[in-house]
Image: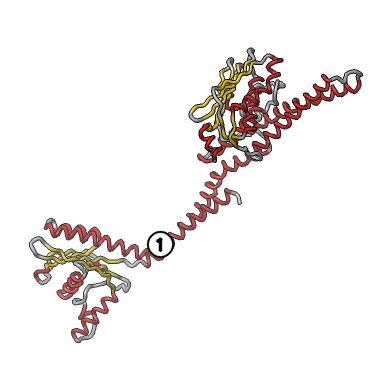
Amino acid sequence: MPLQFKLLCYFLLFGGIILIILWVFQSFFLESFYTISKTSQVERNASVISKSIQENKNVQETIENIASYNNLSVYVYDSNSLFNLIYDCEYDNPSTALKLEYHDVYGYYKDASDNGGHYMCITSNDDAKIARQRLANMLGTQSTDDTAKSQIHFRSNENESSQNMVYADIIGMDNGRECFLIITSSITPLSNTVEIIKGQMLMVSIVFIMLSVIFSLYASHRIAKPISKTNTSAKELAKKNYDVNFNATGYLEVEELNNTLNYAKTELAATEKLQQELIANISHDLRTPLTMITGYGEVMRDLPGENTPENIQIIIDEATRLSSLVNDLLDLSKIQSGAIQPDKHTFCLTDSINNIFQRYAKLIEQDGFNITFESNENVYVNADELKISQVIYNLVNNAINHVGDDKTVIVTQKVKDKKVVVEVTDHGEGIPADKLEYIWERYYKVDKEHKRGVIGTGLGLSIVKSILDSHNAHYGVRSTPGKGSTFWFELEYVSVKKLRQNKKQ
């Protein structure tokens, strides 16, 4: 399902939920909310009047202001003088005015006293009829509106659905006297109001749905557009079109995604170019020994007297070079894929380096190379001896291939902070600082012009990196253009004391 369609559904669903909530509240909770609000309003106003009475400040003015502003009727009685009316204000609304007799006031007073000093109730015309009947029974007369109207608890209009809210509060004074406050408020019938609101809600719902659809279409398109644009560019990248640009904007996540894809595009383009260069270089290195083997073989076959030990040795050397190249490619692939895991054991690193140097005896003798090994002591490490020997061999070969005019390569072994550090230094051209981080890459060459190395296959540094990574070893390079380079790596040092303890065990 397209993202734009999903967003559209989500927006419409959200709008539908809002409409349902509005309809539920106005249909089922409007009257309850109205009653609660009315109750809170009456209680707040009663608190203001009570405070004014206790402080005896502008009582009548306060009562009149509150009653007129909030459509209330207010009565204040002196509880110590048989409920003598001392303040009152009947707002000009028959449904809020009660005509109270002594026994009515006393009844509310008793209810308030039984409820901690406060009492609230909601009465209706039905309650009036019941009160009239009860009063008629007490008097032994027939229940009529004329006989009971002056004695019932309230006077109400003729609307059967009309209701009044009555709030009673006992107010204690500082002088020991006691006042009794009664506030009445009409609860307006909401049936007509609800019908009006429903009609209005219907119109609002229609307009809201139309606006929701329009807004949802616009918003979903606006949100999905940069993602769709990025997706289109990604498809072009998958077709190896590295000229495509990821420039969609809209919000932070999309911009970050486009920056990542632009970086990935650059790296993929560089990787493909380097792969092409590697294939060209390997093809050259494979073709050269094969050409020489074929050429010398044909000479030995066609020309009498050419079947000499020298020609045979050339064929053997070229076949060895070809085999070394193939083996390096296989080793690199196996190490990087994790197919070969290091076989660690404790061995003397110093002796291993000395054994490697024996391979260079002929090179030192015939070509005048000065390859030296500097070490103050024999050190032991816990690693894969064969792989670490391959690391050292490849670093020395790399130094020989980039050696300076003095043809000097220096290998040093030092112990520092329980680490054995091996450094291989040449005095060649060096490596520019902006290229140091790339020289370990499998397809990277600082010198783009392919040169057939004196020793090795050109994959040495990639093999070194893979082996040291498998040992979790630290490594690096320091280089100064025009002065040479120093490649180094470090391994955990195994003390002689610990070595002897392991042997005893």
Q: Where does the image place residue 147, in percent across and percent down from the top left?
A: 20, 81
Q: Residue at x 83, y 20 (%)?
A: 309
Query: Residue 92: horizontal and vertical position, in percent?
Result: 22, 64
Q: Nearer the viewer, residue 263 or 484?
A: 484
Left or right: 298 as drawn, with respect to 475: right
Give the residue number, with chain letter if any, for mark 1. 25
Closer to the camera in the image, 381 or 266:
381
Q: Nearer the viewer, residue 293 or 188?
A: 293
Query: Taking 98 as reference, is 23 left or right?
Result: right
Residue at figure coordinates x 19%, y 77% from the top left: 151
- Count of labels shown? 1
Q: Residue furthest bottom?
A: 140
Q: Quadrant of the C terminus?
A: top right
Asked which colour scheme the image uses, the reply is: secondary structure
Residue 327: image quadrant is top right
What amino acid type should be assigned to the residue bearing mark 1? Answer: Phe
| Corner quadrant of residue 338 | top right
Q: Residue at x 55, y 51 (%)?
A: 8
The residue sitting at the left extreme is 175
Visible residue check, residue 270: no
Q: Please give left or right for residue 148 compared with residue 336 in the image.
A: left
Assess disc 1: are there few (<14), some (14-19) or many (≥20) residues with their C-alpha within 10 Å of its C-alpha.
Answer: some
